[in-house]
Amino acid sequence: MRTEREPDSRDHHGGQLAGLLGEIEQLETIFATWDQAARDAVNAYRGALDALHRTALRRLIRILRGEPQALAALKHAAEDDIVHAVLRYHELVRPSLNERLEGALQSVRPVLASHGGDVDLVTIDPPRIEVRFTGTCDGCAASTLTFHAGVKKAVQQACPEITEVIQVRDGPRVRTTGLASPFASQTTSPWRTVCTLSDIPDQSIHALDLDGVPVLLFRRGALVTCFLDACGHLGYQLHNGNVDAGVITCPHHGFRYDLTNGECLTVAQTQLERRSVRVTAGLVEVRITA
């Protein structure tokens, strides 16, 4: 039995995807400061490139489908994080199991976060998965009710092929790098204005609670990044941690994170969960769910 948390080549690819998406978001933050004519030109240019790439990919897939061996290779390639993300962006593949699982858990996280908790995937081995509660939900007397009424129901509605959802007490979280990115799903929440750019100290953080979802905003000049205020280790909040040279240290167990991309400098397979952010006319806007 193979679990998704076992390190393999996808760990490196996942890191690459997170970095690429971070660069795109940073560029979009800069574009948002331009005047309307310039933004329209950028959007038109991007639309033309998207149309070109989408047409080319559709033709490539149509040709490969006619060759059994090539079709098998294509399906294998689509399992790669970066390839899958681009194909999803162009709506050429269906949402993956990981993507649907992450979406199901994301739907219950605001409720858990309002009580200082969270839930992580531990093992994916269809038709079975394992999850664990973190933060204040770990060991809480009401966690069994939360599990059956919230987590298990959400998972089985989104992923009917998962027939067993098991709650465990330990184990590292499954890496789902990129699945909560702008490439992962077209069903995103609307942009929400949360503060002004000047509210975020340069080279520092600004912590907010958005309808029960705690987030951290980090600013370096005109560039802003946004992450869930939850350490990738055990889910504890980070906002009281020391920030130095763009790196925040968890005040609980000392895990260190690069606030420009969310990567953990302590454990390579751990990272912060990114949320989309942009700056428009000096106002910082965030998408709560990707």
Image (cartoon, rainbow, N blue to C red):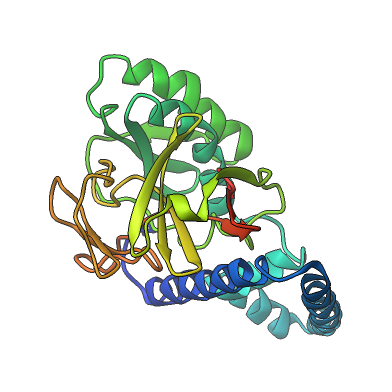
* 200 or 136: nearer the viewer: 200
For this view, does 220 lie left or right of residue 181?
Answer: left
Q: Residue at coordinates 66% horizontally, 47% vertically from top-left?
A: 191
For this view, does 268 lie left or right of residue 227?
Answer: left
Image vertical order of residue 165 relative to residue 86, above or below = above
Image coordinates for residue 27, horizontal then vertical, percent:
59, 74
Residue 122 in sight here? no
Image coordinates for residue 170, horizontal then vertical, percent:
22, 41
Image coordinates for residue 224, horizontal then vertical, percent:
48, 62
* 65 or 179: nearer the viewer: 179
Q: Residue furthest front?
A: 198
Image vertical order of residue 267 relative to residue 252, above or below = below
Image vertical order of residue 66 relative to residue 6, above or below = below
Residue 236 in sight here? yes
Quarter of the rendering occupied by the N terminus: bottom left
Q: Residue at coordinates 33% horizontally, 65% vertically from top-left?
A: 203
Image coordinates for residue 228, horizontal then vertical, percent:
41, 47
* 224 or 170: nearer the viewer: 224
Count every numbered label the image shows and give the total: 0
Residue 249 lies in what quarter of the image?
bottom left
Q: Residue at coordinates 61% horizontally, 56% vertically from top-left?
A: 96
For this view, does 251 lie left or right of residue 200?
Answer: left
For this view, does 35 lie left or right of residue 113?
Answer: right
Q: Residue furthest left?
A: 253
Image vertical order of residue 204 relative to residue 107, above or below = below
Residue 204 lies in what quarter of the image?
bottom left
